[in-house]
Amino acid sequence: MENEVFIKAENLSYAYEEDDGTPQKAVLRGVSLEIKKGEYVAILGHNGSGKSTFAKLLNMILVPDSGRLWVAGHELTSETFDEKELLEVRRKIGMVFQNPDNQLVATVVEEDVAFGPENIGVPSKEIRERVDKALETVGMTEYARHSPDRLSGGQKQRVAIAGIIAMMPECMVLDEATAMLDPVGRREVMDTVDRLRAEKGITVLNITHHMNEAVRADRVIVINDGKIYMDGTPDQVFARAKELEAVGLEVPQCTALIDALREKGVRIEGKSTTPEACADLLTRFLKKS
Ligand code: ADP
């Protein structure tokens, strides 16, 4: 179970079409990857590199032009894949998008969270339990009877996440889910994701622009021009600062600081992507000198 593959893509390609149906330049050009159950993966890439398009293939908002794709044991590209399987896949893979206002549909927080499970026919007693637990997981229990209108951006995204948790998905895809939030809201959402992983072990894909979010993942995949450009641990990926810069990306500030010190001839050893790791390196260095 531990090493079970949750998402497998084989040579996926996708091109949007012009209004007259002619294909544009391909946005995804031969993407192959495997994501294991329980992995926490950050997906990076500059604007327009194809990250959202990839996410939309995962729950069949879009259908690939060629290649094969498996999600949660279902082959989405198989000839026999049907509507019933599609609902199953969509239940297993929850998506959180950029704008919290577009994701909340009800006038009361708890009704919003209940919306998903109601739609898939969960019995009402169980819905009550799921809603209460989901709101507890995202730390929004006290707002259960509030209107979503008055919440902060971070709180709204946490309610959106609660709505997904209530569907009991196996995977959550965050597509720039913190892009419209202030630093406090961003931290609230990222802490919620950490908690979800700890409590439920769900697979997480976080498409983000924030390097300090990417370093929280187990694995970082960089997409460039519709292809996988890098794939490794945060330490491995952020050690390649020049190659990241070449595709319009930066490294986390802590990594940049250590790199800049080395360029000035300071002989610090080791890698650092987080403030804690950076502090450790500097402390060791200062004690030694
Ligand atoms: P990212 O998420 O990395 O910013 P996207 O997957 O959203 O990239 O977009 C990749 C490319 O596809 C961009 O050039 C974008 O303009 C184009 N694109 C995205 N959505 C559509 C669409 N609905 N119709 C046509 N082109 C699109």
Image: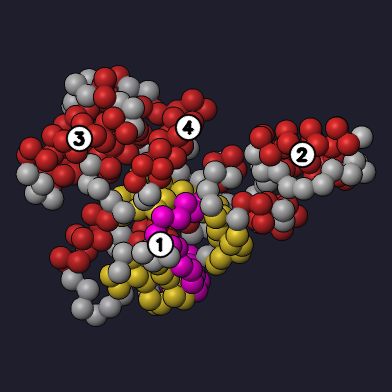
**Which residue is painted at 49% across and 59% down in the image?**
50
What residue span does the magenta drawing correspond to?
Answer: 23-42
Left or right, 231 with respect to 189, comes to right
Mark closer to the chain start, 3 or 2: 3
Q: Position of residue 93 (x, y in %)?
A: 31, 54
Report the mark closest to the observer, 3 or 2. Answer: 2
Q: Main secondary structure of the magenta part?
A: strand
Q: Position of residue 26 (x, y in %)?
A: 48, 69
Residue 136: percent from left, percent from top? 28, 30
Does the Cβ of the disc 3 residue fall within 8 Å of ligand 1? no
Q: Is residue 52 left or right of residue 288?
A: left
Secondary-structure class at tag 4: helix
Label 2 within 8 A of ligand 1 by Cβ? no
Q: Does the magenta segment cover residue 34?
A: yes
Q: CA distance from mark 4 to mark 1?
A: 30 Å
**Residue that label 1 marks:** 2
Residue type, numbered disc 1: Glu
Q: Which residue is mark 2?
A: 281
Q: Mark 4 or mark 1, which is nearer to you?
A: 1
Q: In the depicted view, which residue is nearer to us: 276 or 94? A: 276
Res. 186 mark: 4
- Residue 131 is labelled as 3
Position of residue 53 in the picture relative to residue 169 (left or right): right
Disc ID at residue 120: none
Query: What's the CA distance linking mark 3 and mark 2?
Result: 44 Å
* 243 or 213, nearer to the observer: 213
For label 3, the SS is helix
Q: Of the residues shown, which amino acid type is indicated by label 2?
A: Leu
CB-based contact (under 8 Å), mark 3 and mark 4: no
Which scheme is used to colour this image of the protein? secondary structure
